[in-house]
Amino acid sequence: MDSKRQAKFARLIQKDMADIFLKEGYRLFGNHFIGVSQVRVSPDLGYIKIYLTLMNDKEPQKTVDMIRLHNKELRTMLASRIRNEVRKIPELEFFYDDTMDYVEKMEKIFEELHKQPKSKDEE
């Protein structure tokens, strides 16, 4: 269970990281749309897990790996935004949030179920 302090800090990080990806994402990662779906913060606020949503990306894991390569630069950008609000700039770790892929998969399954012809017993 997260404390109020962790939740407030997570919202701040989520907003700032989403803004960084929106403004600097094209320069760093090309033509990828990167969204921040969730942020988890450790109790000491020193470690952050950032879950990313990647829209229209054929190879999302490659994009996340590319983001991980730019971790230091992203952390520096985040530090410039939150330096007056924290004592220590937290370590960042990025993960791919596959929730949207799961939703799309389930929607396809439901569509297939509705397309199947009804048997004579069901009519």
Image (cartoon, rainbow, N blue to C red):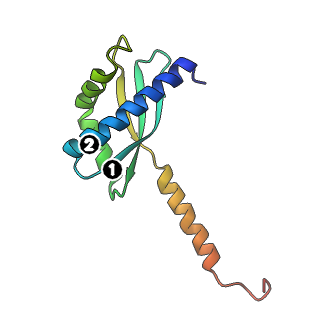
Out of 12 and 121, give the one closest to the viewer.
12
Q: Extreme top residue here?
A: 87
> Disc 2 marks which amino acid?
Gly
Secondary structure beneath disc 1?
A: strand
Q: Residue at x 27, y 22 (%)?
A: 80
Q: Which mark is residue 25?
A: 2
Does the CB distance between marks 2 and 1 fall below 8 Å? yes
Say above or below: 3 vs 118: above
Residue 17 lies, with reference to residue 59, above or below; the image says above
Instruction: Pick the quarter of the image with the C terminus.
Output: bottom right
Instruction: Kindly identify the residue that appears in the image at 27 percent across and 40 percent down.
Output: 23
Label 2: which secondary element? helix
Quadrant into which the N terminus falls = top right
28 over 60 or under it: above or below: above
Image-based side of 6 in relation to 51, left or right: right
Residue 53 horizontal/vertical position (percent): 41, 47
Which class describes the residues within 10 Å of circle 1: few (<14), some (14-19), or many (20+)?
some
Q: What amino acid is found at the position of numbered circle 1 in the picture? A: Phe
Q: Residue at x 51, y 61 (%)?
A: 104
